[in-house]
Amino acid sequence: MKFLKFKKSFYLLPFLLISSSCSLIFDDGIDDYLKEKESESLKIASDRDIRPIIDFYPLPKNSQDSVEKLYEVPLPQQVFSSGTTNEVRLHRLGDIRWIYVETLPSSVWPIMKDFWNANRFGMMEEDPNTGVIQSKPLVIGDLQTKLIMKIEHGIRQASSEVFISHVFQSENEEWIRLTGEDNLEEKVLLSALDFLSKSSSTGGTSLVALNLNIGQKAVLKQNEDLSSFIELNLEFPRAWAAVDRALKEALITVVDLDRNEGVFYVDFSRAEEKGFVRGLFTKDVSSKGTFKIEIKKVEDNKCIVIVGGDSEDSRVFERDLLSEINQSLS
């Protein structure tokens, strides 16, 4: 056995020697440049004519006399993506005006920054987490004023709202909304609307403004007693208008309403769910009742929507009615 092992090792020895010496036998010349030595610089005899260097592509000299007028370079076209129709429109509700954009706030943020810079308002403060941009001080008469733009998530999913405020500093150093002819809110808002309307829809978003996509204004929540309600991060006038529009879009019949009390009375019907066996032996049954939808102001910019039925049996459908309203809102 020892002799056989020795014999096998003896036959393998030549192959090992050949493989280890391949680099010596077959030199590929990869390292040849390391062996080269630096040669002397080329010397040209002084009595020889040297061919002059000719510039075959000469550049014309810049002459001040050739410039007759200054040209203003246009801004590049803005781009953003809203996913569907890229709808942009102006909304009005009383004294409140805002721009509705059918895209996420993180896509609107870089566009509105470009708009702000293009109009040379200057930026005293910008915060992509809150969506706020403040201009540098604007002096109007004896007043120290500034423009404030705020970008928020809209009521509907994947939508944005842009607000413009023009404020001045009072004697108490408080910033108060400017009124009258000197107010620039509508002028700036219309200019921003035009800027957004001319934007194309090829995509683009801001990573630093992704937090703006989280704050939805309509959220369906539940209390500890399992009762449901809708939280609207809106002031009362907008909350009332939003619920009114949602009821119309959901085709829910409003039999009475009282805006001062923040109450809608609606008729709501829903088909009862049945199992397969029960459905074979019973007819389709629907439950219908009159419900009271109440909008309550919790804070200046927050309201809640609650539903109450006219009987104990109708309470099981209250959440379904709230879900219908919330779906129409969003």
Image: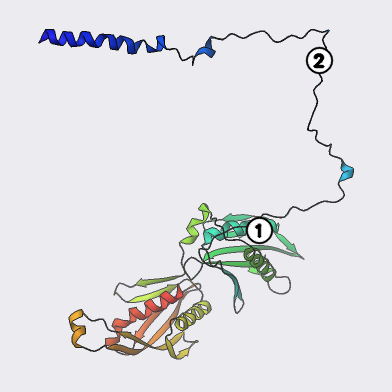
Identify whether 44 is placed above or below 297.
above
Using the image as rendered, state which of residue 18 and residue 272 is in the foreground: 18
Q: Residues within 10 Å of mark 2 (few under 14, many from 20)?
A: few
* Distance between the alpha carbons at the discs numbered 1 and 2: 60 Å
Indicate the amino acid at tag 1: Trp
Residue pictured at 46% horizontal, 64% vertical: 215
User: Which mark is nearer the camera, 1 or 2?
Assistant: 2
Q: Position of residue 97 (x, y in %)?
A: 61, 73
Identify whether 80 is placed above or below 312.
above
Circle 1 sits on which residue?
116
- Can you see residue 131? no
Res 305 quadrant in image: bottom left
SS at badge 1:
helix
Q: What is the basis of the colouring in this image? A: rainbow
Using the image as rendered, state which of residue 193 and residue 243 is in the foreground: 193
Res 37 quadrant in image: top right
Q: Which image quadrant: the C terminus?
A: bottom left
Q: Is residue 3 left or right of residue 58?
A: left
Q: Is residue 125 left or right of residue 276?
A: right
Residue pictured at 21% horizontal, 88% vertical: 282
Circle 2 sits on which residue?
50
Q: Are marks 1 and 2 in contact (CB under 8 Å)?
A: no
Q: Earlier in the sequence, mark 1 or mark 2?
A: 2
Q: Position of residue 240 (x, y in %)?
A: 49, 81
Residue pictured at 48% horizontal, 61% vertical: 213
Q: Residues within 10 Å of mark 1 (few under 14, many from 20)?
A: some
Q: Position of residue 4 (x, y in %)?
A: 13, 10
Q: How many marks?
A: 2
Using the image as rendered, state which of residue 309 and residue 321 is in the foreground: 321
Indicate the amino acid at tag 2: Ile
Identify whether 17 is placed above or below 178.
above
- Can you see residue 147? yes
